Amino acid sequence: MNNSQIKDFIHQQKSLFWFIPEDKKEDVSIEVLVETILNYGDINAIRQLFYLLGVDEVAKHFYSLLNKSERKKANLHELTIHFFTLFFNKYAHRDI
């Protein structure tokens, strides 16, 4: 599912995926990728994520994470949720 650019990106950011076995890192879902980079990535990692997926696609997965159960939503930091909700409301095209 992940193309070679995304796999290279995951490899560059592999320290953020410490909880995933080394041989499984390239196979993470897009939601796990978005969640991890938005929570723990630096500004360059976030920019690269936007470049690879596009702001609208990242926003789609972000909102999908928010619409899951309370337990799953807890994997996003409250400040991350607040900041990216404001960011995506301003910069992402979203069907309402």
Image (tube, helix red, strand yellow):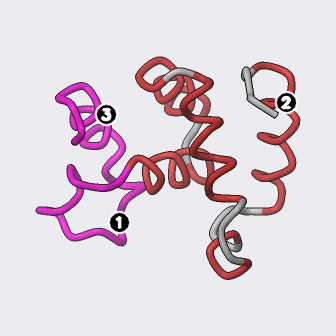
Which residue is labeled 1 in the image? 18
Task: In the rendered view, tell whether residue 84 sits above or below residue 43.
Answer: below
Q: Find residue 9 and name its label.
A: 3
Image: magenta residue range: 1-29
x and y, in percent, of residue 73 in the image: 69, 69
Q: Residue at x 61, y 39 (%)?
A: 60
x and y, in percent, of residue 29 in the image: 35, 53
Task: In the rendered view, tell whether residue 45 sits above or below residue 22.
Answer: above
Name the front one of labels 1 and 2.
2
x and y, in percent, of residue 72 in the image: 62, 74
Q: Residue at x 35, y 66 (%)?
A: 18
Q: Quadrant of the N terminus?
A: top left
Q: Find residue 89 and name its label.
A: 2
Which quadrant holds residue 22? bottom left
Q: Give the CA separation, mark 3 to mark 2.
A: 26 Å
Specify whether 3 is left or right of 20: left
